[in-house]
Image (cartoon, helix red, strand yellow):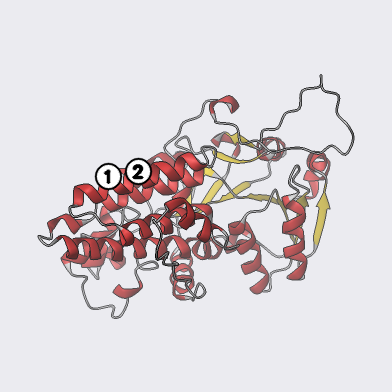
Amino acid sequence: MWRRSASFILDKYQTTQNEAVPSDSVALLPPLLSASTAVALQNPDFDRNMSMSAYYQTPAAHHGVVKSDWLAQAREAATTAVGPEVAASVRSGRTFSVIEEFNSWRKQPDLAEAVAAIRALAAVIRNSEANTMMELEIELKKASDSLKSWDTTSFSLTAGCDLFMRYVTRTSALVYEDFNSAKSRLIECAEKFVEISSKARRIIAMLSQDFIFDGCTILVHGFSRVVLEVLKTAAQNKKLFRVFCTEGRPNRTGLRLSNELAKLDVPVKLLIDSAVAYSMDEVDMVFVGAGGVVESGGIINMMGTYQIALVAHSMNKPVYVAAESYKFARLYPLDQKDMAPALHPIDFGVPIPSKVEVETSAQDYTPPQYLSLLFTDLGVLTPSVVSDELIQLYL
């Protein structure tokens, strides 16, 4: 079984390869890192002694394998600048609002909703007037619940809040006798969590490059920032490929993605959503993002993802999912109606009689058996291993 590497997200521990990580620093590692990772950080020979199983060596091999060169690329990607950080605004003279803070971060076009929520919760710690750790945790819990209730249909928002809360409650800040020192350490850990989450998209893009080959045709559905990063990285690596973009009704997100790809000089063909089966014989692979990854290994994504996966599966085309680990949600839907519907108004361009019912749900659930691999910042996973990763994240 492959081992998750911490080296690509812990920059400050990379200053020397021969220096062991202090034991008190290992205690502060986020739940994104497994116990074996902590051992690896303390033992420089761990990497050399760790063997990796062959990918899909047997039909029973359910775990994805991250090759050493992929990890090297991920480490390099993580050290690449992710852009200037925007300092959180200080709202002097008025009461701090976690919703206002969240909305201010959410306006940034390249910032995922879950990361905006994590930044808002970090600001709660920074602005808190609590005098004990218990009071601070209660304040954080109320802020987290407020964010989750702001949009109950956003699975990435819910997962991001839950994961951050789990992360905060697992820190070693409680061992400090002085509350101010503990609070400062919590703020430091929160910023580290944000940094890890911000780098996830770049890591995923680097891990997926071996699956994009010259001359391939990739079908994408909707607008996903991480999928765009995957394709952008492939274009920067001088790979020759073309992309089929679905229109993505009702909000036409496919049009937005096609415009972005055209700016990169990537050959793009725009399809109406109902032309997926018609065009699938020209497609080599399907790449989609995810609003949420659930315990079964399935995904919740923009409406139409399920039927695209069904068509691809029937024609033996691989379906790849690019999703950050903060979108891993503790949910187990059994069918499409198990989710709170995210509604979008639909304009058909003609008047609709009042007696005609219109389906306005904006997302669907794709079961794991129709997905091939998930590219995450934790590595390349098969759907069946997602539940194991969720245990590591939330245990």
Which is more toward the observer, 62 or 171? 171
Residue underneath mark 2: 142
Q: Is residue 115 visible?
A: no
Q: Is residue 48 visible?
A: yes
Which quadrant would residue 46 be assigned to in this image? bottom left
Query: Badge 1 local density, few (<14 within 10 Å), some, or many (20+)?
Result: few
At horizontal 60% and vertical 62% (from top left) the residue drawn is 109
Which quadrant would residue 350 be assigned to in this image? top right
Instruction: Give the farthest residue toward the top.
Output: 355
Residue 10 is left or right of residue 282, and the answer is left
Residue 47 is left or right of residue 333, and the answer is left
Q: Is residue 34 above or below residue 214?
A: above
Q: Which mark is residue 83?
A: none
| Residue type (three-letter) at the residue carrying disc 2 | Lys
**x and y percentages locating residue 348 in the rendered image:** 84, 37
At horizontal 65% and vertical 67% (from top left) the residue drawn is 232
**x and y percentages locating residue 302 in the rendered image:** 65, 42
At horizontal 54% and vertical 47% (from top left) the residue drawn is 373
Label 2: state its secondary structure. helix
Residue 188 is left or right of residue 85, and the answer is left
At horizontal 52% and vertical 25% (from top left) the residue drawn is 334
Which is more toward the observer, 51 or 204? 204
**x and y percentages locating residue 237 in the rendered image:** 64, 73
Report if the CB atoms under discs 1 and 2 are less than 8 Å apart: yes
| Residue type (three-letter) at the residue carrying disc 1 | Ile
